[in-house]
Amino acid sequence: ATEMQGLTGYLKDYSILPKVGASIFRDSEGNLAFPRATAGYSGTWDDEDDEIANSDATLAANLTLTPKRVGAGTSITKQLAAQNSVDYETFMRNELLYGVGTAVDRGAITGTGTADQPTGLLATSGLGSYTWAVGTSLRGNVIAQWKVLRDAKCPMQSVNWLFDAGVRANWSTT
């Protein structure tokens, strides 16, 4: 007789968005609108008896997010569900969750905004970027990336790096 053991998993993608600081909005019932500013207030040094100069923030149109749906599904026979000695249902649920998580990551990063996909970061116009090829990640390129962030007034405490395995391997040698 063959004794069945637990299912053996395989290497799979995990959702990385929460790890790099992305906000996840759950249980929303419609569009989400976020007011946004394109320029903030600035302070000035003035003489003790001078009037303080006013500088107003520059506001832009709201950033509006519209709902999208992602899902994964499968089917099994009633016989498999009833007769298996392994917890196949838990295995399937976990695999479906990994599939959804991977689809969410891909949509948020590389989504085209067409064919029901969300518009991902790489397809969003107006975002700053610094492109560098695998094999050329010299110290100067890394410093240049930090400069792009600083010039954009990015709060450095919230910076996270998101890159593929080739770039990670290359950075590991820098």
Image (spheres, rainbow, N blue to C red):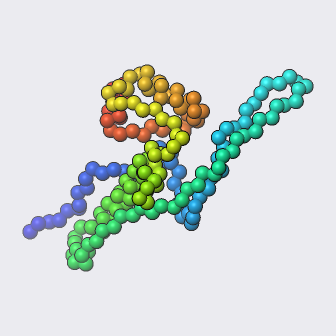
Q: In x, y percent, where is residue 125?
A: 51, 43
Q: Nearer the viewer, residue 30 or 98?
A: 30
Looking at the image, can residue 94 be seen? no
Would you say 48 lies left or right of 135 here?
Answer: right
Looking at the image, can residue 66 be seen? yes
Q: Nearer the viewer, residue 70 or 129?
A: 129
Q: In x, y percent, where is residue 137?
A: 37, 26
Locate residue 57: give its quadrant.
top right
Q: Nearer the viewer, residue 42 or 96?
A: 42
Would you say 49 lies left or right of 116 here?
Answer: right
Q: Residue at x 75, y 30 (%)?
A: 43
Q: Residue furthest left?
A: 1
Locate residue 52: give its quadrant.
top right
- Quadrant holding the C terminus: top left
Q: Is residue 136 above or below residue 168?
A: above
Q: Is residue 172 above or below residue 127?
A: above
Q: Is residue 40 above or below residue 49?
A: below
Q: Nearer the viewer, residue 94 or 44?
A: 44
Q: Residue at x 43, y 60 (%)?
A: 116
Q: Residue at x 25, y 55 (%)?
A: 9
Would you say 87 lies left or right of 1 here?
Answer: right
Q: In x, y percent, where is residue 50?
A: 88, 26
Locate residue 140: give its quadrant.
top left
- Quadrant holding the N terminus: bottom left
Count of numbered circles on the image: 0
Would you say 4 lies left or right of 73 here?
Answer: left
Q: In x, y percent, where is residue 129?
A: 48, 35
Q: Is residue 61 above or below residue 91?
A: above
Q: Residue at x 39, y 30 (%)?
A: 132
